[in-house]
């Protein structure tokens, strides 16, 4: 049973390795599996009994459960003050936006459709449209052009299936708020909506129709842009007036997409100058929609959707940005001592002054403006979910001042010592210690997931495991680091916890021991030291965004804060940490990646100089040689054996005795010399090596372990001879004929 199970697992990994060479999908399938907690059963796919609220009665009746979910997902149209809409007239000069859709545009849209997505009610997957692209591009372009010209969409394009998914970490799954609706639209409908979304987005950026402080779902803007604006405000205020306090109030917009008023949204589009044909097609897109709610074992009848924007549509994000644009426009002038920071439906108010008390008064006044906007737009804020934080680096600031809070609608919002903003943890001193601690915990979890896939003797190849680390673990460790690291790059011990996780993961990749030098792990896997990689990424982004319009606006905001906060007469504003980083990268005139490689080489040479007198092969290999080629095509056990021989941090007597393992004699059991890689591979008479030396063509150890062909022969020989006990099982599995084992039968076939 054990052997059959083991070989079935081998077969699975072999199949995944084949998929890896084609699309890489198998790697990510393995990665998703590994992220499940060990021993954790699958979550119950069935929807439990639901109730309207905490006081309601639970029910398992499908019709009642659908009604409960529909009330939550598709609320009735909000009450909106539309008195000003009647007075709004269409703009006198409309934007010139093309109605015609070209065949080339359709070809690009179909080519870029994501693969593997669940289709909507028509059950036509994206892959079918991509396969038919050469024959349908022209007809589809003509049909969409006519739809734009007439302002009408087929009714089937406004039908969808709403899948009910659990939100992670909720305490009570009998409440509808613990679930998230995912809208599955018809594939052709998404093509039409994407073509329309592209036109609206192009016009918005070309004519500056959206507020500059809206950072989400826009070109050249991202989470990093939002973090850049916040850090610039804080750092500039601190520099202009030491001891000042910067405060941020994070708002919560309840059911943002679900409560969008169609009339108000269309009025906003007209006021922005969009042509009537585009307003008409958007109106058709919003009106007359219907959906079915689906969960395991049940699909409801059609449910009309009378308000909101369908989540999951390519058109929804850009429409919502216009819907909320007036709010952020009213909070976009830092000369007033306050600026809004938007990221789609996340809105944050940032202000600065000499005290937290003054900031709280200003934030309260700004929130009144937000409430007036909400009355006109039918939006609802949830003060009970607001978060407040005061940033200061002055330790002498009175605790009483930093304890100042805000009261909104009878809800008291106390200041916190940590706040999560767009996935980044903030602390009052902007030291980023809390964020680093949080990502270190996540990184440890991801490292444990990697350990379930990769061992020294079994698992994906070294190359595949390295890819998994680079794609799944390192992004967790460095999330947002292009911004938060700008003030920490020269601090030696800040990243020690993150570097330890990378070191642990690289040992999984190589099969190396815990005492393996970090420099050797990095060189053999071609993985740069984390601190150097972080600096290069931050510098490269600083150069890439130097000409972005939003960067000029962030700089203008810094100038306004400096002018407002500076007590003495006018003096030039010193650059922020991110501005200094960009200036230094430009002045150096060397690409950041090249500079990183240069600094990495210097570190490696320094480590090599401090290695033992009988230098292992890894330190003798020229820096420019790509060591990954030595491991290419080797099974995991053979790759691990090669790595151990090259570093000589290996379970042979000489090394074990050198690190003080009790009871280990450095001599080989032949009694003639110490048991080292050189002795075992070239001199120990117990093992036959004629074929090995003939295949290698040399008896020089450094040459054997530095040439791809001979290195592979040496690795196979070491495992086959059973020199190290850790490869015993790998050798047994290699000798077995896996094709003779049959997989377990399904229960239905018993």
Image (cartoon, rainbow, N blue to C red):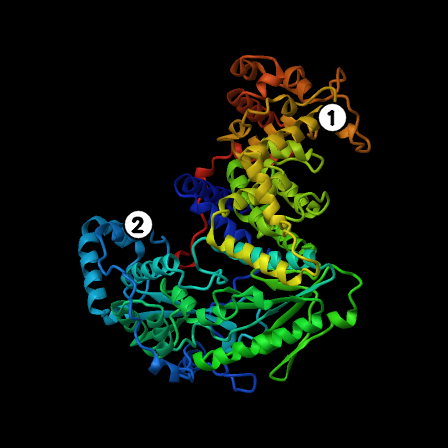
- Residue 326 higher or lower than 569, as above or below: below
Question: 93 and 52: which one is in front?
Answer: 93
Say whether residue 718 is left or right of residue 297: right
**Picture residue at 57% right of the left edge, 45% below the top:** 538
Q: Secondary structure at mark 1?
A: loop
Of the image marks 1 and 2, the number of the one nearer the N terminus? 2
Question: 283 and 376: which one is in front?
Answer: 376
**Picture residue at 56% right of the left edge, 30% below the top:** 638
For the C terminus, the quadrant is bottom left
> Is there a contact, CB below 8 Å, between mark 1 and mark 2?
no
Query: Residue 226: x percent and y percent?
Result: 54, 58
Residue with the mark numbered 2: 111
Check residue 105 in the rendering and tell me which mark sits there, or answer none: none
Q: Secondary structure at mark 2?
A: helix
* Residue 250: quadrant of the picture: bottom right
* Residue 441: quadrant of the picture: bottom right
Query: Residue 152: x percent and y percent?
Result: 22, 70
Check residue 610 in the rendering and tell me which mark sits there, or answer none: 1
Question: 66 and 345: which one is in front?
Answer: 345
C-alpha gap between disc 1 and disc 2: 53 Å
- Residue 16 higher or lower than 251, as above or below: above
- Residue 100 higher or lower than 490, as above or below: below
**Picture residue at 54% right of the left edge, 48% below the top:** 472
Residue 18 visible, this angle: yes
Query: Residue 747: x percent and y percent?
Result: 43, 58
């Amino acid at each position: 049973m054990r052997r059959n199970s083991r070989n079935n697992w081998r077969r699975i990994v072999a199949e995944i390795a084949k998929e890896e060479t084609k699309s890489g999908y198998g790697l990510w399938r393995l990665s998703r599996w590994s992220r499940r907690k060990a021993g954790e059963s699958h979550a119950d796919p069935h929807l439990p009994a639901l109730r309207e609220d905490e006081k309601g009665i639970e029910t398992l009746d499908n019709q009642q459960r659908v009604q409960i979910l529909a009330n939550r997902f598709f609320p009735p149209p909000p009450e909106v003050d539309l008195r000003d809409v009647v007075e709004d007239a269409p703009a006198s000069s409309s934007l010139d936006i093309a109605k015609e859709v070209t065949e080339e545009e359709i070809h690009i849209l179909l080519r870029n459709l994501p693969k593997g997505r669940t289709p909507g009610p028509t059950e036509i997957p994206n892959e079918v449209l991509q396969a038919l692209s050469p024959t349908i591009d022209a007809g589809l372009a003509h049909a969409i052009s006519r739809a734009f010209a007439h302002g009408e969409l087929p009714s089937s394009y406004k039908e969808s299936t709403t899948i009910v998914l659990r939100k992670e970490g909720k305490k009570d799954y009998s409440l509808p708020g613990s679930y998230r609706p995912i809208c599955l639209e018809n594939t052709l409908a998404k093509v039409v909506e994407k073509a329309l979304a592209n036109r609206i987005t192009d016009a918005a950026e070309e004519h500056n129709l959206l507020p500059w402080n809206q950072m989400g779902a826009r070109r050249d803007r991202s989470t990093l842009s939002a973090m850049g604006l916040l850090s610039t405000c804080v750092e500039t205020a601190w520099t202009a007036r030491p001891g000042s306090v910067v405060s941020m109030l994070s708002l919560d917009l309840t059911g943002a997409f679900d409560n969008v008023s169609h009339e108000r949204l269309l009025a906003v589009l007209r006021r922005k100058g969009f042509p009537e044909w585009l307003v008409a097609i958007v109106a058709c897109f919003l009106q007359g929609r219907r959906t079915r709610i689906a969960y395991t074992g049940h699909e409801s009848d059609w449910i009309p959707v009378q308000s909101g924007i369908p989540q999951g549509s390519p058109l929804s994000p850009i429409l919502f940005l216009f819907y909320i644009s007036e709010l952020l426009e009213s909070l976009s002038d830092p000369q007033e001592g306050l600026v809004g920071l938007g990221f789609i439906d996340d809105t944050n108010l940032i202000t600065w002054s000499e005290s937290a008390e003054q900031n709280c008064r200003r934030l309260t006044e700004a929130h009144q403006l937000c409430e007036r906007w909400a009355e006109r737009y039918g939006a609802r804020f949830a003060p009970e979910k607001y978060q407040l934080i005061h940033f200061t680096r002055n330790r002498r600031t009175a605790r009483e001042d930093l304890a100042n809070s805000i009261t909104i609608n009878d809800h008291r919002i106390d200041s916190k010592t940590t706040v999560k903003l767009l996935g980044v943890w903030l602390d009052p001193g902007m030291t980023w210690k809390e964020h680093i601690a949080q990502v270190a915990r996540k990184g440890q979890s991801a490292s444990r997931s990697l350990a379930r896939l990769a061992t020294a003797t079994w698992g994906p190849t070294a190359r595949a495991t390295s890819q998994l680390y680079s794609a799944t673990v390192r992004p967790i460790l460095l999330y947002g680091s292009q911004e938060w690291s700008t003030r920490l790059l020269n601090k030696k011990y800040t990243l020690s916890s993150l570097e330890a996780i990378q070191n642990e993961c690289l040992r999984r990749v190589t099969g190396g021991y815990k005492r393996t030098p970090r420099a050797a792990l990095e060189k053999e896997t071609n993985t740069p030291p984390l601190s150097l990689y972080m600096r290069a990424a931050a510098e490269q982004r600083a150069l890439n965004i130097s000409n972005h319009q939003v960067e000029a606006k962030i700089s203008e905001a810094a100038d306004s804060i400096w002018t407002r906060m500076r007590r003495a007469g006018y003096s030039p504003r010193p650059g922020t940490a991110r501005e200094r980083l960009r200036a230094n990268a430009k002045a150096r005139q060397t690409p950041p990646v090249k500079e990183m490689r240069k600094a990495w080489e210097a570190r490696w040479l320094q480590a090599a100089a401090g290695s033992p007198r009988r230098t292992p092969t890894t330190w003798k290999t020229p820096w420019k040689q790509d060591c990954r080629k030595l491991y290419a095509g080797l099974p995991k056990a053979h790759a691990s054996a090669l790595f151990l021989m090259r570093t000589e941090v290996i379970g042979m007597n000489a090394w074990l005795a050198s690190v003080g393992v009790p009871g280990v004699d450095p001599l080989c059991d032949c009694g003639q010399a110490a048991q080292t890689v050189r002795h075992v591979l070239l001199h120990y008479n117990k093992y036959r090596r004629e074929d090995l030396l003939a295949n290698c063509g040399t008896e020089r150890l450094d040459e054997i372990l530095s040439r791809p062909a001979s290195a592979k022969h040496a690795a196979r020989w070491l495992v086959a001879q059973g020199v190290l006990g850790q490869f015993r099982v790998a050798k047994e599995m290699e000798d077995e004929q896996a094709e003779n084992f049959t997989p377990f039968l399904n229960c239905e076939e018993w």
